[in-house]
């Protein structure tokens, strides 16, 4: 057990226990509660004024187009093959798609009512004109009729401005009977009427402005902000609201979403984007088929000419040489050669067609070249097998091969041309809509519950942080151990804070009559109990002192000297001693207010006129010499022989002479008075006076020859870690 106590006593001073952390939090509970409440109210206010953001979403599928033409599937798939989802996402987000939507939906025209700052839009958003008893438009707040307060509507179908004015805000002011006025830079631009196009042209106004308002519902005088955005700005704004992603991996299903404050506008805009994407997909398939068809139609006349020429050569050779038909062996070689030449001709046409789309280094072109080289090698092998045939058979074989190859190529081109015509006529694209655009009922932003919780937590954490920072920055001593360890002064008493004293002081400031001596009003208060222990310790201190004079001072103002001196004097008087309390603070003394007496004459007057008696009885065995009227030279009066004579005289008449003095570091009065007192105590306030300040004040008194016996730690905060550690227990008799 002794070892455990030794370990506890050797614990470093800078180690903070869990109980001390809890005490710091409890002491700053009002800061924490206030910060939490402030952030919570701020979050609620933000949620009230924040514009709710809704979302519209849709699903589309990008798939491989299956041709209904059976044998023509090869050609159709060449033009409508499967596209990667990443490529389709970029197509949707391209200016080619979004730009058309901006044009069709007039997204470059931005118009909205002018709301009162901060709260105006929130008030207007909550107004329901269709509710029973409501007028079409909300009543202006504080007669601010130029702002919109709810129920206003406007629709602009055309707004054209010169390029220099794009992005610049215009003001549209609603008039009576559908009239309006457009203003720019406080200058009228044009006057118009709803449903009729208007344009500017007057001298001194921006020219080339055209405006067509199709709907306007507002009180006369209500202002709207109107602007024509740059085309690229409108596209970027729409792109920022749009999200496109693939659901899963390689599913080909794309999820589209768009956000905005208006649910109907979100749904309409997203549907326009989907329809535009579908249209461009079909147009792309049709355009590719048209390009390929044009290529084949250009090739057909040339192939037909080659076929006719080959037939003519074969017939002429047979007539000239009266050649018989080919043998069975030659016929077999011919069929194989025709197949190879036909494939070579097809490859040549395909390479010409692909050459319009790809470069020679493209993988598709390289593959076609490899295939052609392979067929060319096979052709050479067959040609080598015909060298043993007669010359006439070889020539007939060559001419017959040219005819059959040209015939097959020409037939193949005709078939493919017909296929492309059908593909072009029946182009439907490879995209289909799974879910059309629908808007969410509840807003997706702001997330009210999350923001409220985060704001509350942030407020609480910030409050706790402020409390801990304040505690760290507060260099004032907090415990008697800290005073003794850092200043070397023994602590004779530790006086806790008194809530009862605070109430009495507030009543006194409000003008309540009478004094506020705590020892009389609340003798069982813990602060008074601690002063009783000081009274006991004083009895032993006075035995060793050269006189019965006790000085109470402090390093700075507001340490509670008047409280300690007045209540200590009362307790000494209650013990049967004859006590004189002297208010030696001739600058800001207020002991007369503590006892509830007037201070017309006091110590200042007695030092000027030694024959004057300003001693006042303020209780049984207790007398008071108040400070009197504030003199212009208090230090000189205290250094005068009259003050020394007064102290000698009072020491002989009273058992204890208690002197309340000004702060040490403020003036030199305490050093002057302390030279004539046998016992001096330094009253310090917890969490107010730093240890270095107490040490410096003590050293100044010691340099003046003042014997500082110890310190009185006043105003100790009652915390979980301190309260009860110094004997502060409520123990009193109760009536039976």
Image (cartoon, grey):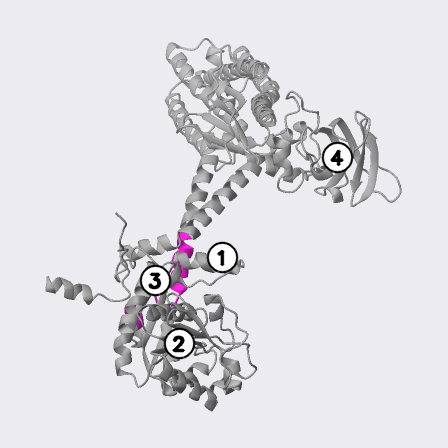
Mark 3 and mark 2: span between their CA atoms? 22 Å
Pointer 3 residue:
527
Mark 1 and mark 4: span between their CA atoms? 55 Å
Instruction: Select label 3 or label 2 by which is in front.
Output: 2
Residue at the image position 65 percent from the left and 21 percent from the top: 130
Residue at the image position 37 percent from the left and 63 percent from the top: 519
Side of 308 relative to 695 (left or right): right
Mark 2 and mark 1: span between their CA atoms? 27 Å
Q: Residues within 10 Å of mark 1 (few under 14, many from 20)?
A: some
Pointer 4 residue:
222
Pointer 2 residue:
580
Instruction: Select label 2 or label 4 by which is in front.
Output: 2
Side of 111 relative to 635 (left or right): right
Q: Could you tell me if residue 462 is visible in this image?
A: no
Labels 3 and 1: the sequence-earlier one: 1
Q: Nearer the viewer, residue 589 or 228?
A: 589
Label ID, residue 329: none
Instruction: Select label 4 or label 3 by which is in front.
Output: 3
Q: Which residues are magenta?
A: 462-483
Pointer 1 residue:
507
Q: Is residue 57 magenta?
A: no
Q: Seen from this angle, which residue lies furthest bottom?
A: 641
Q: Nearer the viewer, residue 286 or 650?
A: 650
Q: Is the Cβ of the residue at disc 2 closer than 8 Å to that at disc 4?
A: no
State the SS at label 4.
loop
Quarter of the image containing the N terminus? bottom left
């Amino acid at each position: 057990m002794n070892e455990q106590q030794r370990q506890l006593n050797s614990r470093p001073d800078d180690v903070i226990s869990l109980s001390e952390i809890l005490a710091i939090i409890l002491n700053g509970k009002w800061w924490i509660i206030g910060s939490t409440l402030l952030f919570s109210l701020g979050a609620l206010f933000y949620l009230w004024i924040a514009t709710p953001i809704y979302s519209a979403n849709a699903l589309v599928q990008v798939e491989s187009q299956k041709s209904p033409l059976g044998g023509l599937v090869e050609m159709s798939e060449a033009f409508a093959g499967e596209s990667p989802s990443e490529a389709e996402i970029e197509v949707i987000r391209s200016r080619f798609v979004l730009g058309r939507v901006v044009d069709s939906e007039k997204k470059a025209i931005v118009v909205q009512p002018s709301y009162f700052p901060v709260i105006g839009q929130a008030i207007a958003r909550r107004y329901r004109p269709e509710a029973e008893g409501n007028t079409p438009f909300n009543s202006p707040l504080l007669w601010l009729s130029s702002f919109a307060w709810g129920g206003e509507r406007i629709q602009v179908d055309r707004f054209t401005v010169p390029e220099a004015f794009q992005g610049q805000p215009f003001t549209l002011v609603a008039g009576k009977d559908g009239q309006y006025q457009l203003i720019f830079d406080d200058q009228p631009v044009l006057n118009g009427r709803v449903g009729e196009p208007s344009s500017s042209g007057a001298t001194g106004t921006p020219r080339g402005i055209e405006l067509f308002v199709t709907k306007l519902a507002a009180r006369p005088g209500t202002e709207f902000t109107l602007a024509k955005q740059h085309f690229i700005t409108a596209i970027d704004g729409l792109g920022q609201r749009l999200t496109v992603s693939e659901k899963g991996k390689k599913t080909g299903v794309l999820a589209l979403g768009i956000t905005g404050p208006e649910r109907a506008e979100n749904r309409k805009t997203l549907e326009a984007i989907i329809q535009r994407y579908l249209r461009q997909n079909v147009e792309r398939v049709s355009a590719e088929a048209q390009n390929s068809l044009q290529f084949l139609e250009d090739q057909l006349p040339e192939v037909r000419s080659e076929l006719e020429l080959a037939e003519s050569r074969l017939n002429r050779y047979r007539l000239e040489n009266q050649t018989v038909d080919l043998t069975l062996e030659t016929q077999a070689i011919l069929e194989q050669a025709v197949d190879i030449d036909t494939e070579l001709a097809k490859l040549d046409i395909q390479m010409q067609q692909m050459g319009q789309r790809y470069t020679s280094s493209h993988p598709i072109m390289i593959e076609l070249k490899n295939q052609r080289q392979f067929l060319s090698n096979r052709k050479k092998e067959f040609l080598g097998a015909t060298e043993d045939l007669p010359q006439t058979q070889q020539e007939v074989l060559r001419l017959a091969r040219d005819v059959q190859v040209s015939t097959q190529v020409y037939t193949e081109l005709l078939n493919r041309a017909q296929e492309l015509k059908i593909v072009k006529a029946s182009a439907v694209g490879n995209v289909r809509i799974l879910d059309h655009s629908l808007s969410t009922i509840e807003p997706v932003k702001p997330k009210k519950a999350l923001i409220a919780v985060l704001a509350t937590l942030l407020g609480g954490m910030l409050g706790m942080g402020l409390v801990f920072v304040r505690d760290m920055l507060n260099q004032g001593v907090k415990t008697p151990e800290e005073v003794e360890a850092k200043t070397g002064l023994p602590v004779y008493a530790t006086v806790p804070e008194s809530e009862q004293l605070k109430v009495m002081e507030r009543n006194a400031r409000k003008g309540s009559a009478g004094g506020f001596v705590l020892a009389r009003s609340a003798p069982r208060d813990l602060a008074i109990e601690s002063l009783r222990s000081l009274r006991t310790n004083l009895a032993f201190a006075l035995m060793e002192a050269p006189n019965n004079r006790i000085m109470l001072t402090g390093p700075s103002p507001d340490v509670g000297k008047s409280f300690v001196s007045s209540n200590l004097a009362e307790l000494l008087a209650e013990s049967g001693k004859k006590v004189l309390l002297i208010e030696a603070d001739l600058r800001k003394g207020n002991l007369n207010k503590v006892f509830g007496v007037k201070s017309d004459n006091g110590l200042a007057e007695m030092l000027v006129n030694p024959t004057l008696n300003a001693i006042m009885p303020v209780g049984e065995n207790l007398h008071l010499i108040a400070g009197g009227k504030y003199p212009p030279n208090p230090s000189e009066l205290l250094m005068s022989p009259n003050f020394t004579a007064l102290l000698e005289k009072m020491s002989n008449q009273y058992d204890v002479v208690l002197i309340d003095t000004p702060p040490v570091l403020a003036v030199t009065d305490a050093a002057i008075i302390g030279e004539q007192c046998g016992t001096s105590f330094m009253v310090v306030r917890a969490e107010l006076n730093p240890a270095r300040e107490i040490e410096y004040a003590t050293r100044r008194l010691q340099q003046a020859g003042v014997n500082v016996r110890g310190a009185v730690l006043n105003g100790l905060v009652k915390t979980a870690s301190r309260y009860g550690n110094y004997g502060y227990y409520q123990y009193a008799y109760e009536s039976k």
